[in-house]
């Protein structure tokens, strides 16, 4: 879910960019978040994801392969961070998501029986889940592509924020704002959905571009601290606490500015909140992260990629080899341009 902060993020804190602006930058990507994007977006007209002859979903591999090639060709240095064991505080959220997916799957089956394509697509997206074999396949793909990855002990976004705060990465990347609560100085959004996208539930399209959101600019413009942002997230609702019904980002901002802490807000409103406030705060300020990672990028193992995608998962070999050839040509062209720039 992620905490909903978009309504109060000031325009001054958001910088629209192009992928080429990330050349030479290490970007720590919340991989689970990105894989979910691929699984929900890359689907057929009936809502079914891409799959191989054995029925294994391959939408995530499709997105990961082509997007990562593009990142590398543009000179960006991606490192993918995989979630570990979710904290106990998140158990209710995980259970609720599981129940929502199960209900959506039942609705999808009913739509399938009636042939309702629109409903089939809607409910299949809601029922999407990331299985263990998908994670394992993604890791294998990154290995043959020469791209580093990190196995977080717990929350992936906490790990990306930690790496960014340390200076091992320039920014975190996710569609959620949580890495800002974990203290990431910069958050890159829209890396996985760049291009023309259909608005959910509507027959309209928008052009999506990458954005960099700067934490310090948010705090300065709103005259708050990161700790205040965490307090606001508790009122709004985050992965560790359901929040207060009826309180959105703008009201949460006003209440925390007036009262300072959640306890004071609850007292002023005469309500109670069923969550361990100190534990929630600590989950953001002292998350479980690891130093056990090494960052290094190697040349793409083209035959390894072909074996994995084409031999094991039935990708079109012509399409995969064409993508690899185009990538290699872009890399050669980029190197020649850099040599010319150095010469002059």
Image (spheres, rainbow, N blue to C red):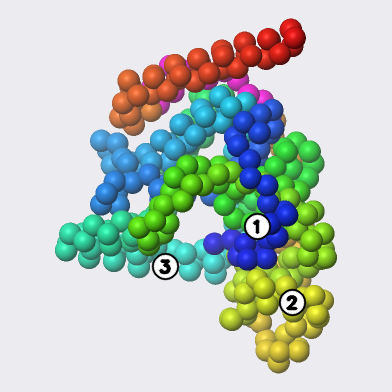
Residue found 68% across the figure and 47% down from its top: 15
Between residues 263 and 121, which one lies in front from this camera angle? 121
Rendered position, 6 above or below 267: above
Q: CA distance from mark 3 to mark 2?
A: 34 Å
Quadrant showing the N terminus: bottom right
> Nearer the N terminus, badge 3 or badge 2?
3
> Nearer the N terminus, badge 3 or badge 1?
3
Rendered position, 308 above or below 184: above
Between residues 91 and 219, which one lies in front from this camera angle? 219
The picture quadrant where one finds residue 286 is bottom right
In the image: residue 274, left or right of residue 209: right
Count residues near mark 2 (Cα–Cα under 10 Å), then give few for <14, some for 14-19, many for 20+. few
Q: Position of residue 326 (x, y in %)?
A: 46, 19
User: Marks 2 and 3: in contact by CB < 8 Å?
Assistant: no
In the image: residue 113, left or right of residue 201: left
Magenta range: 295-308
Rendered position, 82 above or below 98: above
- Residue beneath disc 3: 99
The residue positioned farthest toward the top in the image shown:
343
- Residue beneath disc 1: 178
Rendered position, 237 above or below 311: below
Of marks 3 and 1, the one in the foreground: 1
Q: Visible in this render: residue 206? A: yes
- Does residue 25 belong to the magenta stretch? no
Q: Position of residue 80 (x, y in %)?
A: 59, 38
Q: Position of residue 177 (x, y in %)?
A: 64, 57
Quadrant showing the C terminus: top right
- Residue beneath disc 2: 254
SS of the residue under disc 3: helix
SS of the residue under disc 2: helix
């Amino acid at each position: 879910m992620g905490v909903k902060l978009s309504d109060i993020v000031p325009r001054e804190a958001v910088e629209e960019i192009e992928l080429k602006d990330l050349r030479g930058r290490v970007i720590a990507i919340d991989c689970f978040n990105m894989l979910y994007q691929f699984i929900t977006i890359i689907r057929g007209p009936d809502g079914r994801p891409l799959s191989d002859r054995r029925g294994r979903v391959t939408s995530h591999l499709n997105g990961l392969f082509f997007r990562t090639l593009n990142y590398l060709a543009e000179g960006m240095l991606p490192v993918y961070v995989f979630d570990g064991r979710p904290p106990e505080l998140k158990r209710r959220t995980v259970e609720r998501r599981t129940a929502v997916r199960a209900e959506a799957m039942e609705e999808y089956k009913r739509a399938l029986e009636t042939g309702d394509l629109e409903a089939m697509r809607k409910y299949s997206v809601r029922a999407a889940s990331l299985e263990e074999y998908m994670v394992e396949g993604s890791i294998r793909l990154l290995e043959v592509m020469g791209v580093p990855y990190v196995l977080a002990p717990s929350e992936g976004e906490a790990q990306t924020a930690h790496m960014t705060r340390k200076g091992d990465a320039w920014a975190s990347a996710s569609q959620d704002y949580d890495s800002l609560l974990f203290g990431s100085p910069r958050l890159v959004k829209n890396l996985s959905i760049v291009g023309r996208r259909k608005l959910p539930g509507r027959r309209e399209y928008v052009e999506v571009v990458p954005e960099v959101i700067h934490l310090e600019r948010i705090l300065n413009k709103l005259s708050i601290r990161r700790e205040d942002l965490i307090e606001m997230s508790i009122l709004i609702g985050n992965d560790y606490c359901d929040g207060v019904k009826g309180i959105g980002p703008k009201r949460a901002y006003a209440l925390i500015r007036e009262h300072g802490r959640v306890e004071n807000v609850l007292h002023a409103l005469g309500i109670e909140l069923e969550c361990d406030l100190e534990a929630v705060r600590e989950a953001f300020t002292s998350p479980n992260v690891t130093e056990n990672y090494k960052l290094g990028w190697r040349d793409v193992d083209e035959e390894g990629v072909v074996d994995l995608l084409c031999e094991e998962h039935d990708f079109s070999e012509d399409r995969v080899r064409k993508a690899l050839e185009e990538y290699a040509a872009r890399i050669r062209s980029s190197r020649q341009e850099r040599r010319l720039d150095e010469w002059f």
